[in-house]
Image: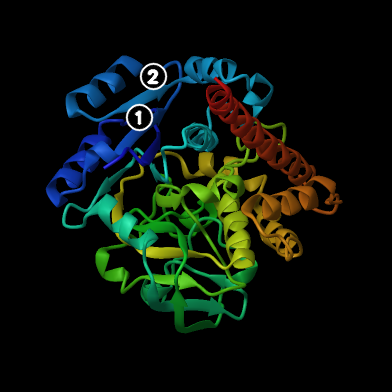
Amino acid sequence: MSQDVCVVVPTIRNHECMRDYFENARRHGFDLDRTFVVLVTEDFCDTDAMERMLDEEGVDGAVFDGTAREAWFEEHGLSEYDHLIPAASHAQTSFGLLYLWANDRFDYGVFIDDDTLPHQDEDFFGTHMDNLAFEGEIEAVGSDERWVNVLYQNEDEHGLYPRGYPYAAMDEEVETGTATVDDVVASQGLWTNVPDLDAVRILMDGDLQGQAQTRTGAEDFEGDFVAAEGNYLTVCSMNLAFRREVVPAFYQLPMDDNEWDVGRFDDIWSGLFLKRACDVLGKNIYNGGPLCEHNKAPRSTFSDLTNEVHGLELNEHVWEEIDAVGDDADSYAEAFEAMGRRLAEGDYDDWENGAFLNYCGEFMLDWLDCLDAIETATAEPAVAAAED
């Protein structure tokens, strides 16, 4: 089978976690020859050790620290777009999206965070691929607030809401039904052990070490589901697979490295953009398995709060802004352009750090220009070869 899966791993702490994912693939018969692993890291990290790990595991891949990313942009004639990848930020996963887009052999992408491990009794890669191929009936979840808590199945017991869930949408009335699904474009695997919470909710849970006193287990997840059309959900990139086609609407925004010090909403807001595009285009995001074990390292909850607080008010409203546009789009790029223009041109002076949304909108439009430039560059050699 051809190499069709690009696995993107942002890592500065524990690239060795990937050995467990490779072992999981071998245990369940998933062909690792299908995968190419892109490790996105920093200049201060041991890139030689990362390359050795890939060699020892016999898995094809490449390591991109800051210097290597800069060289990649230059080699592809894209230096004017290198600002799209923020420095020292989880949002550097966007580089993986660019790498995928520039190599048309990849039909799928997979995001894995380096503080996770697969459940060895579940076929991690195989389940994600099955989810993306799913056709049939599945539970559809919505609410009177138009938001779905991805931890809703046992919320009465644990009371958790995930990072990025708007405070104004809490205490929702959950509505469940059945949907017939035939076009899944993203598969979000959920997580056991440390729940993915924001700092305010972690503090409310009585934890000062950036984790949570309340933990989740496999028993908290009763089945797979989709968020009903017109409903939004949090999308976390620690355990996520997607089809190539979504890349134009899946940019991980420029967090942390900005004058407003807004951070920690890159995957959350990209998930909103993707869900809006999916609703417009009649696509679906599949949620549930495969589960991963989230082993978030202890750190100051107040440090996370410092990174998040500058964007908390914006997070209450950004979904409403993008929900107002893009109805007539017939592609991911068109939907994303409508959302980008809405944010770039909006007047958000009434919200704290509202100008950051204008900034994001400008970057969103640059993202589309960058993808167009990549497509043009990759098409030119093919045209030249045909002429020869």
Q: Earlier in the sequence, mark 2 or mark 1?
A: 1
Determine whether 13 is above or below 194 in the image.
above
Q: Which mark is residue 143?
A: none
Kind of residue indicated by mark 1: Arg
Is 273 on the left-hand or right-hand side of 103?
A: right
The residue lying toward the viewer, choosing from 352 and 90, is 90
The residue lying toward the viewer, choosing from 85 and 77, is 77
Q: Which mark is residue 13?
A: 1
Residue in the image at 31% along x and 74% along y: 222
Q: Residues within 10 Å of mark 1 (few under 14, many from 20)?
A: few
Residue in the image at 45% along x and 48% along y: 237
Determine whether 348 is above or below 143 in the image.
above
**Residue matched to label 2:** 45
Kind of residue indicated by mark 2: Cys
Residue in the image at 71% along x and 60% along y: 329
- Mark 2: secondary structure: loop
Quadrant assignment for the N terminus: top left
Quadrant assignment for the C terminus: top right
**What is the total number of numbered labels drawn onto the structure image?**
2
The residue lying toward the viewer, choosing from 67 and 327, is 327
Residue 353, image x, y percentages: 76, 44
Q: Residues within 10 Å of mark 2 (few under 14, many from 20)?
A: few
- The outermost residue toward the front is 388
Residue 173, image x, y percentages: 55, 82
Instruction: Kindly report the distance in space between the C-alpha atoms of the residues bearing marks 2 and 1.
Output: 8 Å
Q: Check if mark 2's residue and mark 1's residue have beta carbons within 8 Å.
A: no
Residue 201, image x, y percentages: 50, 58
- Mark 1: secondary structure: loop
Q: Residue 8's image quarter?
A: top left
The residue lying toward the viewer, choosing from 369 and 158, is 369
Residue 375, image x, y percentages: 60, 34
